[in-house]
Amino acid sequence: MPDSHTHKTVTSHAVNITRLAEAENLIKTYCLYPDLYYGKDKNDIEPYLFMDGDVGFHDIPPSSITELYQFWIPDENGQLHRGRQYKNASYLFTEKCFAFYFENIKKAVAEKRIDDVMKFTGCLIHHMQDATFGLHVLEGASGADVYTFNKLSGVDFMSYFFELKLKDEWQQENVSPIYLGDTPGEAAMNLCSQYVIHNKKSCNSLFAIAANRISKNDDAILDTETFNMYMSSVSITSAILYTVGAWINNTVFEKKSLPLVDIIPYESPLGGTGNYRLKMLQINENELEFGVHFEQNIIYHIAENVFENFTAELIAQNVNSVKIEVINDGKTIDSFEISGNEKKNIKIESPQGVFGLRTSSTKPSGALLLRNGQFNRKD
Ligand SMILES: [Zn+2]
């Protein structure tokens, strides 16, 4: 939870980097909206703030990874099956939340309601700053909470994290902001990934700060890791402001394909046999690698009507036999078996919605690689 000063500093830094015009009120007030909602201005702020029933971003549901390796049930042949379907509550919440903001921003841009654009944007960047700086970092994606640290260490980290200080010279740092996409759906999809990536980096920094506090208590480590969290916050805020600015100015970008490794799955494969036992999805330069298990899925949520096709090579590595179901738009569109060290080219037309592979094996062994996966755009 950054304080108001941190929210304003990160916002003004990102406004400078992206040269967003008419952003005075965004820096002064709108980037604080989700906190001000709890005060006397509740009714004015409510229309601009995403709420899912009584759940707002400050209370984002966690998604536990334990669901990916627990809950197996054996059948009469000794074959294990998943007892329940994996549900990534954090992902489902954030994609709805981001779609709400980007749809409202796009509409307000089209109707030239720039003050409304800034109010919706202020709420969205506040959420992303909460998710990348201070104690809220621990919540949400693969969540825990600050009390976990208190429980493990006996130290009150709630107040310690709340007092993390910024340094003025950090505002000279630059980042090259990424463009999230032309449509609200694509921007929301890319922000889901950016959120997980930056949140994870900030989690690593927050853990380093906690470990330092109970061991060396070295100010240099505290400064470096606080700086890293600050820059995560500036990067993700800049990506949003850069995208909103491009929508306002009708900036046209070159149409590049989107590498599969740049987006974060809704459901990740976890574990396998031998070397892959309890191993998480490995993300290498241009390939994904995971162990074969009884049932294992790699599922994405892909924006609608953005991509022409998806291409990749699926490579088996010392597998007995794996059944592959290819999923697009929530339906099985193809299925086949792959074994040994076989390679197969995959091409999927109009990839969108619930998308990916469901795999299963009666005799799990070896690994699967997805190499050079990319989503190619419509012209
Ligand atoms: Zn907040």
Image (spheres, rainbow, N blue to C red):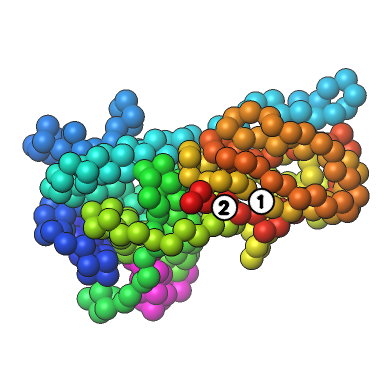
Is residue 227 found inside the magenta-colored segment of the image? yes
Relative side of 332 to 213, left or right: right
- Measuring 52% from the left and 51% from the top, which residue is drawn there? 377
Relative side of 156 to 12, left or right: right
Q: CA distance from mark 1 to mark 2?
A: 8 Å
Q: Give the camera-side residue of 66 and 212.
A: 66
Q: Which residue is mark 2?
A: 376
Q: Give the camera-side residue of 286 and 78.
A: 286
**What is the chief secondary structure element of the magenta stretch?**
helix
Q: Which residues are magenta?
A: 213-232
Percent x, y of residue 330: 59, 30
Q: Give the camera-side residue of 207 and 114.
A: 114
The quarter of the displayed image where residue 355 is located: top right
Relative side of 174 to 327, left or right: left
Marks 1 and 2 in Cβ contact (< 8 Å):
yes
Disc 2 marks which amino acid?
Asn
- Tell which residue pokes out farthest to the left in this image: 40
* Mark 2: few/some/many CA within 10 Å (<14, 14-19, 20+): many
* Mark 1: few/some/many CA within 10 Å (<14, 14-19, 20+): many
Q: Specify whether residue 374 is in view.
A: yes
Percent x, y of residue 49: 24, 38
Q: Specify whether residue 160 is in view.
A: no
What label sits on residue 240 in the rendered view? none
Q: Which residue is mark 1?
A: 311
